[in-house]
């Protein structure tokens, strides 16, 4: 036997021996899960995503790893939602408001003055009604895991202090590109101007619009205090975020892997809500320190605005279904009575 032939036989045998181990090495490669979000890494979204990633890696023994991709690098909420539905992306967190075009029942969370405080929101979102709405996503190719908090939305403007319903009259107010928001503020007397968030600061600076509405955290981080004088604590809408998974991807996971993601999502939810609320308190104090004139809408005036929006509520009820509307109202009333 020639040296060349002996070498060839040895190499073939070595390759055959190594093949099963190469396959084994491939088998134990961690699952890499792309998790997209819109804000930057140092935001409340970014911090909670980091907690989620750490919990997933820890609970799976390193077999599952989250690749967090923030700052809308994977696209807007709507673009990421479509990527999840198509199976091109695994996970994301984003606004429930942007899901209304996919799952109409999500519009229930856009109801003005639905919740009086965060505790009520937690009880309803984490309860049967919140789960029922989330489960509807599966029909459209998404799996909802948990609700995070964006926060209560509040009003800023550069025209006048808003202390009563009549003060809304004629204010050019930027609103989200969402029919409930547009119709709600028109009904309250404002000139509602739908604009993408990316255009908002410039619109305020150039006085294309007089005001806007967002949670404290966003008002501060976006530096709206530089171009806005008045802030009214209206808490007119509570905005949740929702953690979702591509159903195509979810269905490929084992029950144990699904449990890892669900348990980690719940831990991240609890962290995120606490973190966001603490940040919101600091943000309000900072906005005052930066010269914004802050006032609280009285319960009487909030009630007047709520009454003015009866028609809007009727439209939401029709769109989401009367059964869901009644279940939600009953759940809120129960949560309110449990104080």
Image (cartoon, grey):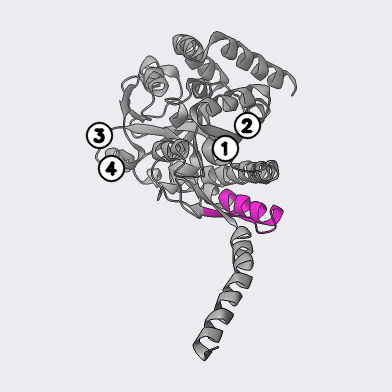
Considering every residue shown, the one lying at the far right of the view is 338
**Looking at the image, do the residues carrying marks 4 and 1 touch, with CB atoms under 8 Å apart?**
no
**Looking at the image, do the residues carrying marks 2 and 3 touch, with CB atoms under 8 Å apart?**
no
Q: CA distance from mark 4 to mark 2?
A: 31 Å
Between discs 4 and 2, the one toward the N terminus: 2
For the C terminus, the quadrant is top right
* Residue underneath mark 2: 118
Q: Residues within 10 Å of mark 4 (few under 14, many from 20)?
A: few
* Residue underneath mark 3: 208
Q: Nearer the viewer, mark 2 or mark 1?
A: 1
Q: As rendered, which of 222 and 161 lies closer to the eye?
A: 222
* Residue underneath mark 4: 202
SS at circle 3: loop
Residue 129 belongs to the span the image colors magenta = no
Q: Is residue 301 above or below residue 147?
A: above
Between discs 2 and 3, the one toward the N terminus: 2
Q: Residues within 10 Å of mark 3 (few under 14, many from 20)?
A: some
Between discs 1 and 3, the one toward the N terminus: 1
Q: Is residue 33 above or below residue 159?
A: below
Q: Is residue 36 above or below residue 65?
A: above
* Residue underneath mark 1: 149
Task: Tell me which secondary structure the magenta stretch mostly adopts.
Answer: helix
| Residue at figure coordinates x 52%, y 25% from the top left | 139
Q: Is residue 150 visible?
A: no
Q: CA distance from mark 1 to mark 3?
A: 30 Å
Q: CA distance from mark 4 to mark 3?
A: 8 Å
Between discs 2 and 1, the one toward the N terminus: 2
Q: As rendered, which of 239 and 190 lies closer to the eye?
A: 239
Q: As rendered, which of 155 and 113 lies closer to the eye?
A: 113
Where are the magenta residues, as a range? 48-67
């Amino acid at each position: 036997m020639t040296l060349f032939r002996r070498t060839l036989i040895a190499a073939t045998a070595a390759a055959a021996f190594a093949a099963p181990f190469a396959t084994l090495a491939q088998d134990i490669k961690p699952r890499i899960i792309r998790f997209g979000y819109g804000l930057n890494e140092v935001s409340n979204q970014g911090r909670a995503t980091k907690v989620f990633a750490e919990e997933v890696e820890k609970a799976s023994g390193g077999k599952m790893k989250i690749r967090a991709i923030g700052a809308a690098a994977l696209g807007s909420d709507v673009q990421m939602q479509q990527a999840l539905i198509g199976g091109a992306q695994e996970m994301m967190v984003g606004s429930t408001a942007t899901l209304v075009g996919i799952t109409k029942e999500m519009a229930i969370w856009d109801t003005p003055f639905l919740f009086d405080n965060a505790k009520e929101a937690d009880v309803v979102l984490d309860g049967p009604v919140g789960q029922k709405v989330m489960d509807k996503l599966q029909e459209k190719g998404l799996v909802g895991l948990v609700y995070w908090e964006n926060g209560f939305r509040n009003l800023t403007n550069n025209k006048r202090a808003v202390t009563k319903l009549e003060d809304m009259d004629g204010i050019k107010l930027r609103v989200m590109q969402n029919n409930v928001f547009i119709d709600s503020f028109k009904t309250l007397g404002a000139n509602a101007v739908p604009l993408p968030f990316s255009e908002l600061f410039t619109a305020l600076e150039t006085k294309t619009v007089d005001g806007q509405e967002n949670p404290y955290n966003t008002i501060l981080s976006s530096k709206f205090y530089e171009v806005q004088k008045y802030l009214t604590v209206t808490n007119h809408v509570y905005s949740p975020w929702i953690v979702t998974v591509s159903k195509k991807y979810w269905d490929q996971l084992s029950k144990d892997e699904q449990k890892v993601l669900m348990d980690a999502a719940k831990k991240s939810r609890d962290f995120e809500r606490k973190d966001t609320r603490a940040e919101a308190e600091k943000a309000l104090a900072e906005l005052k320190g930066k010269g914004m004139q802050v006032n609280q809408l009285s319960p009487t005036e909030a009630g007047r605005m709520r009454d003015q929006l009866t028609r809007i509520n009727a439209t939401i009820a029709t769109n989401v279904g009367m059964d869901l509307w009644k279940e939600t109202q009953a759940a809120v009333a129960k949560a309110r009575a449990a104080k």
